[in-house]
Image: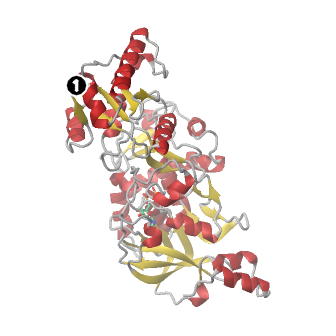
Amino acid sequence: MKQISRREMLKMSVAGAGALALGAVNAQASAIDAKDVKFDEEYDVVIIGSGFAGLAAGLSAAKRGNKVLIIEKMGRIGGNSVINGGGMAVPVNPVQEKTGIKDSKELFIEDCLKAGLGLNHPELLETIANRAMESFNFLVDCGVQFKMDHCAHFGGHSVARSMLTTNDSGSGYIQPMLEKFEKTDGCKLVRRTKFDDFVVDESGKVVGVAVREEYKFDDKLYNDDLENTSGTKKTIKANKGVILAAGGFCRDKAFRKLQDPRIPDNVDSTNHAGATAGVLLKAFELGAYPVQVDWIQFGPWASPDEKGFGTAPILTQQGTFKYGIAVDVRTGKRFMNELADRKTRADAEFKILRAAPDKFPITFADTKMAFKDLSEEIISKGMSSGKLVGECKSLDEIASKYGVPADALKETVKKYNEGVKAKKDEFGKQESALSEINEAGPFYVIRLSPKPHHTMGGLKINEKAQVLSSKSGKPIPGLYAAGEITGGTHGASRLGTVAITDCIVFGMIAGENI
Ligand code: ADP
């Protein structure tokens, strides 16, 4: 299993050893040459990743009689998909028809383009719109159970068009899809098996993968993809090719910071631990076109004082942002409209964290008002750790506990209340959301930090889910991709619930075409 170094490659081309096409030489330089490999196992199709995209691709390829292997590097299957909220945008679906909601594919595309600032690749968006309903039926056939009495109306969509699983979770998809896949003859899913590299033949076609079995993902490493040496090496032949469904890179400290230097290393993400960029980077090495890799979506409603998505998004959005304010602890002053769009708020928070990485801004409201719209269940969940929500008797206590200049903080609250009385907020907070803060306290306080939530960019694919090469502009033979590892569908910002549609449609397509 010999890897050709760049120096060797250079020597080869200088010596005129390139009877091979240039593309093929380059591909070999960044992958393993099939001539040097004695494969340990053989399948028709090998899929990297066991989320929505990987399982959809697996089921779709298996349906066509292929022997399919899905490899998953983590001990748990389902990546971000299994912890997802379970909403799937399906324009023009039967539940809309039943409940009298008028929708169209064009309206769906328009909504996505608006959120995506027009950067969406139209042919990918159209593909999703055209095949969303078919992908929904594909899921029903797999045994996924949807609520059939109503669709949900998510932010940014013009109409209610998102289908929900009966258990309000992505696991409602992953479980039945996995069961169906594993019951299919010739199909296998293996965990703790990490994709390391491509095996490429002399024509430049991807014909297999190098993996490590018994891989132990290590969350404590700064860069698991580069530093982790665990596991036993193996090579697997993929007669028809390889499908990349390895998800996004919101948990990759090194790579996300290269794309967006505002992201400090100590900022957690809403994603599962294994959301790293290793597979994406290997595909780039092979010559795949990169697309919009630095568009990363952040949740400005998250807190550094709990892991993952947590409960802060609910306590702030429906609580302290509405009935209180957010303050820069360095100055004691407000710095944003607490109810602006996601990007505006995340940018404002990043401005502070970039200058002072440990100075997480705070949001607070007086205890009588703060959580009055929320259920007991959510409040006690938020309070249970004792770390997320701080309770302070007075503004002076907030100042001393969070290191805020006390006089400035008092002045800020006074000024805010004056704005409420005058129905004019200095940051343009909506009038309907203006209510006075009781200066006497007590207060609930939450620290804020925007958490990376979704990486919009990735590999360029065409409507057939083939990965396109930057060396030829054409598909890389034997290489397909689907889901969050691909880029372009969502443009600058993904609308909620379009991720599942994207994963299932292109997973299905990859399985069809391979
Ligand atoms: P999507 O929503 O696009 O389907 P997910 O995050 O749900 O993405 O799933 C991607 C899966 O791919 C995750 O479970 C992740 O652990 C897995 N994965 C990522 N990199 C590798 C790799 N190098 N080898 C095997 N599996 C990987």
- Foreground pick, 406 / 125: 406
What crowding class fits label 1: few (fewer than 14 Cα within 10 Å), some (14-19), or many (20 or more)? some
Q: Quadrant where the C terminus lies? A: bottom right
- In the rendered image, the residue lying farthest to the top is 422
Q: In the rendered view, tell whether residue 293 sits above or below residue 156.
A: below
Q: Quadrant of residue 259?
A: bottom right
- Residue beneath the point at 76% across and 83% down: 13
Decide if residue 395 is on the left or right side of residue 225: left
Q: Which residue is mark 1?
A: 442
Res. 180 image quadrant: bottom left
At 39% across and 59% down in the image, what residue appears?
Answer: 79
Task: Choose between 238 and 250: the one closer to the eye.
Answer: 250
Q: Is residue 350 visible?
A: yes
| Position in image of residue 70 (x %, y %) | 43, 70
> Is residue 118 placed above or below 218 in the rendered structure?
above
Residue 347 placed where, x, y %?
Answer: 51, 38
Residue toward you, 490 or 259: 259
Above or below 340: residue 109: below
- Is 172 left or right of 441, judged from the image as shown? right
